[in-house]
């Protein structure tokens, strides 16, 4: 019994990390072990000389100083989980090394181009709103814009891995006369179900950017159930879900058709567009 409890305690420590964090740490550990085995070094517990050399190795193969730090923090997290000793990153030696790497790798992060109302209105001209698939894609665009949403809130990461506890279902949306009310159960900052965020999206009658019109049209064409993914679509194979990579590829093709450089946009473009500039209604009135 005591051994089982200890084993369960170790599992709970691992479960404290989000699945995406665990996947990143797996990459960090594999990279570190490759480095140590190649140079015939003892990997754990991590010593100061080994960590300093590994940090410099990463700096020689990475483009951004932030990425170097992430790999080091991954090692630190594993050491904490296993209760192994780990060098203090707050020591002056490491702080100076990180500062030197930041200077050597002077790097401005590449940011996705925002999808703003004028671009969205132009983009809407290239959608076939008689198609269940394209109507669902457009609903993702509109909801992502108004909700300032990360793509992980809207779409599953891969085909066949839809999680109703994370991505929105039709049950999470209520249609009112002048708005759509969305209940958000999970996000990057709500990972433990500690609260539900209720978000009203105001209707904009007669506008292609009306969230109420977009979701009603998508739902009518898909004929999906309330327990299904909010943006499910109807195909010859039945009801299907859109995944993140599929959405990004689709939107970039539409942007290219609209005469824009689709490669400059990403799944974060909707969130950035919604956060920038004047209010949506003010912007629409000025178009």
Image (tube, grey):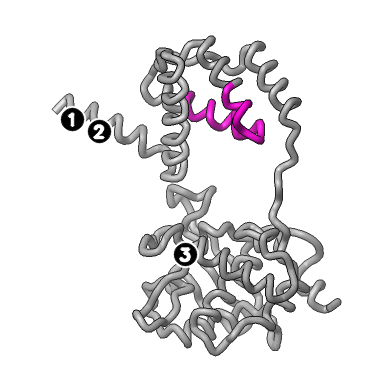
Q: Where is residue 218 drawn, in percent x and y?
A: 51, 82
Residue at the far right in the pictured view: 286
User: In the picture, which quadrant includes the C terminus?
Assistant: bottom right
10 Å neighbourhood of mark 2: few (<14), some, or many (≥20)? few
Q: Identify the residue under disc 3.
A: 243
Is 176 situated above or below 45?
Answer: below
Whether label 1 touches label 2, CB < 8 Å? yes
Q: Identify the residue under disc 2.
A: 8
Task: Identify the residue at image location x=45%, y=45%.
Answer: 20
Q: Is residue 170 left or right of residue 115?
A: left
Is 87 situated above or below 260?
Answer: above
Kind of element beneath mark 2:
helix
Kind of element beneath mark 3:
loop
Q: Where is residue 111 drawn, in percent x and y?
A: 71, 51
Kind of element beneath mark 1:
helix
Q: Identify the residue under disc 1.
A: 4
Task: Identify the residue at image location x=74%, y=26%.
Answer: 104
Give the number of the mark in front: 1 or 3.
3
Task: Identify the residue at image location x=17%, y=25%.
Answer: 3
Q: Does the stretch in magenta take in 80? A: no
10 Å neighbourhood of mark 3: few (<14), some, or many (≥20)? some
Query: Between residues 47 and 82, which one lies in front from this camera angle?
Result: 47
Give the number of the mark in front: 3 or 2.
3
Per the rendered image, the range of residues in magenta is 57-76
Q: Is residue 188 left or right of residue 286?
A: left
User: In the picture, which quadrant includes the N terminus?
Assistant: top left
Q: Is residue 254 left or right of residue 30?
A: right
Q: CA distance from mark 3 to mark 2?
A: 33 Å
Q: CA distance from mark 1 to mark 2?
A: 6 Å
Whether label 3 touches label 2, CB < 8 Å? no
């Amino acid at each position: 019994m005591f051994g089982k409890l200890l084993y369960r305690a170790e599992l709970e420590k691992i479960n404290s990390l989000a699945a995406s964090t665990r996947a990143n740490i797996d990459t960090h550990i594999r990279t570190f072990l490759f480095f140590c085995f190649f140079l015939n070094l003892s990997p754990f517990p991590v010593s100061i000389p080994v960590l300093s050399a590994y940090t410099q190795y990463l700096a020689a193969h990475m483009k951004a100083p932030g990425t170097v730090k992430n790999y080091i923090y991954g090692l630190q997290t594993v050491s904490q989980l296993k209760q192994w000793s780990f060098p203090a990153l707050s020591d002056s030696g490491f702080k100076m090394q990180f500062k030197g790497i930041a200077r050597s790798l002077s790097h401005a992060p590449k940011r996705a181009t925002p999808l703003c109302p004028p671009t969205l209105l132009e983009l809407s001209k290239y959608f076939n709103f008689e198609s269940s698939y394209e109507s669902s894609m457009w609903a993702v665009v509109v909801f992502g814009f108004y909700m300032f949403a990360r793509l992980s809130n809207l779409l599953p990461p891969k085909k066949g891995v839809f999680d109703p506890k994370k991505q929105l279902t039709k049950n999470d949306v209520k249609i009112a006369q002048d708005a759509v009310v969305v209940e958000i159960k999970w996000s990057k900052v709500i990972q433990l179900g500690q609260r539900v965020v209720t978000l009203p999206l105001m209707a904009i009658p007669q506008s292609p950017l009306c969230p109420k019109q977009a979701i009603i049209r998508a739902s009518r064409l898909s004929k999906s159930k309330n327990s299904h993914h909010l943006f499910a679509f109807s195909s010859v194979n039945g009801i299907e879900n859109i995944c993140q990579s599929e959405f990004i590829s689709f939107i970039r093709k539409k942007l290219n058709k609209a005469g824009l450089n689709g490669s400059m946009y990403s799944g974060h473009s909707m969130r950035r567009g919604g956060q920038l500039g004047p209010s949506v209604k003010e912007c629409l009135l000025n178009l």
